[in-house]
Structure formats: structure tokens, C-alpha cells
Image (tube, grey):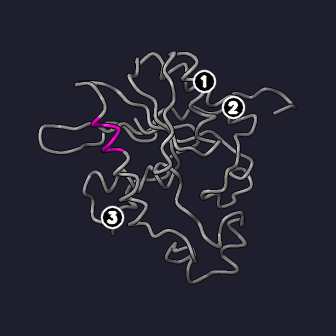
Amino acid sequence: MLWRHGQTIWNVERRFQGQSDIPLDDTGVRQAERAARLLAALRPDLIVSSDLRRATGTAAPLSRITGLPVSADKDLRERHGGAWEGLADTEIRERYPAAHATWSPPEGEPSEAVGERVSGALQRVTASLPEDGLAVVVSHGAAIRLGMARLLNIPEELWGVFGPLANCAWSVIGSGRTRWRVLEHNAGTLPEPVLGDDR
């Protein structure tokens, strides 16, 4: 199970986070708590997380509920955004129109490298699971999408077929007899409850 971290203020501001270590905001904390209750019912055997705070903060409630420790793996980090990190989407479009058109951040990590890095981490996680075991891997939107596509052997020009994961949503992949397959994508995306004027 590949679980995207909860919301951060940079998500709200539509800023490119990349490997900048941004924590969850209050909404993200609530998202993680709610999702953890759902995921704990699946009785995972292992929790592995990116070492960035927004991922470890998302994994923490699941760890508390299940009693499982969280193992950190820096290979599950988000794509390094180079010159784009911290910039809003409008700023990226204005300053880097050609790079934005191909989604290639200057001085950033190429999509293929992210796919290789994350799929390697996913294979290591899988190798450490008991037969028919379940791992919850907490990572980031692009890292999950690119790593999952690489693991599934989808050609790079088709990696965009997976739409983005919402904050605190997850995808489920499993290994069949001969290959990996997608069992669910963007699951757990219920709207945030309205809490009144303080939201």
C-alpha cells in the first residue's frame, strides 16, 4: 500500500515541495489520524516511510494505533525539485515556461531517476515482508506515481496515465503470478469534514 502524506501549507499554496522538509499543517494531521484508523483495520505487518517530516508525521498515528515501528528510507523521498523548490505554480510557469511544459525542473531530479530510486525501495520493502504480508509505505505524490509506474514496467511516456494522489490517499499494488498489478488507486479520498469557521 502506497500512502501519500497529508496536507501541508505548501500544498495549499501550490508550492513545489520536492525534498524541502515541510511539516503537516493542522488539516494534514487530521487527515493522517483519520486514514490511520482505516488502515490499521487492514492489520499491516510493516510501516516504511520517507524520512521527510510530512511523511513521518503521516505515518506516526498508524504506528501508535498498530504498535508497529516506522522504518525510514530516504529513497522514498519526493522528487528533488532543484530551482523549483519553494516556488508557487504560477512562479514556475512564469520563470521556467519551457521546463514547465516538459515538467523538467532545472537542477532537479529526472523522472526516470525518481522511478528507479523509488521502485528499488519498494522492492526492498516487499522482500522484507512475510508471505501475504501487507506493508504501508508512506511517501509523496510524484515519488509514488513514478515509482509505481516503474515497478509495473509501464513505459515512461505513459507514466502520466496515473492521475495524482490526493493528500493522505493511497494506491494498492500487489504481485500476481508473473507481474505487479494495481488493485486500487487514489483510495481513501473522502472530503474533509466542515468544522465551522476555524477550518
Q: Which residues are magenta?
A: 122-127
In the rendered structure, find residue 164 and report the number of the disc placed on it. Answer: none
The reply, left or right, for residue 123 in relation to residue 192 is: left
Please give the name of the residue rendered at 40% of the width and 53% of the height, measured from the top-left corner: 162
In the rendered structure, find residue 61 and report the number of the disc placed on it. Answer: 1
When asked about the image quadrant of residue 108, the answer is bottom right
Please give the name of the residue rendered at 43% of the width and 32% of the height, measured from the top-left corner: 136
User: Mark 2 vs mark 1: which is more N-terminal?
Assistant: 2
Q: Quick one: SS at disc 2?
A: helix
The reply, left or right, for residue 104 in relation to residue 42 is: right
Residue 123 magenta: yes
Q: Amino acid at mark 3?
A: Leu
* Foreground disc of the pair 3, 2: 2
The C terminus: image quadrant: top right
Residue bearing the label numbered 3: 158
In x, y percent, where is residue 97?
Answer: 61, 81
Residue 187 magenta: no
Q: Amino acid at mark 2?
A: Val
Circle 3: is it few (<14), some (14-19), or many (20+) Cα within 10 Å? few
Please give the name of the residue rendered at 53% of the width and 54% of the height, measured from the top-left corner: 78
When asked about the image quadrant of residue 117, the answer is bottom left
Residue bearing the label numbered 2: 29
Circle 2: is it few (<14), some (14-19), or many (20+) Cα within 10 Å? many
Please give the name of the residue rendered at 54% of the width and 35% of the height, measured from the top-left corner: 189
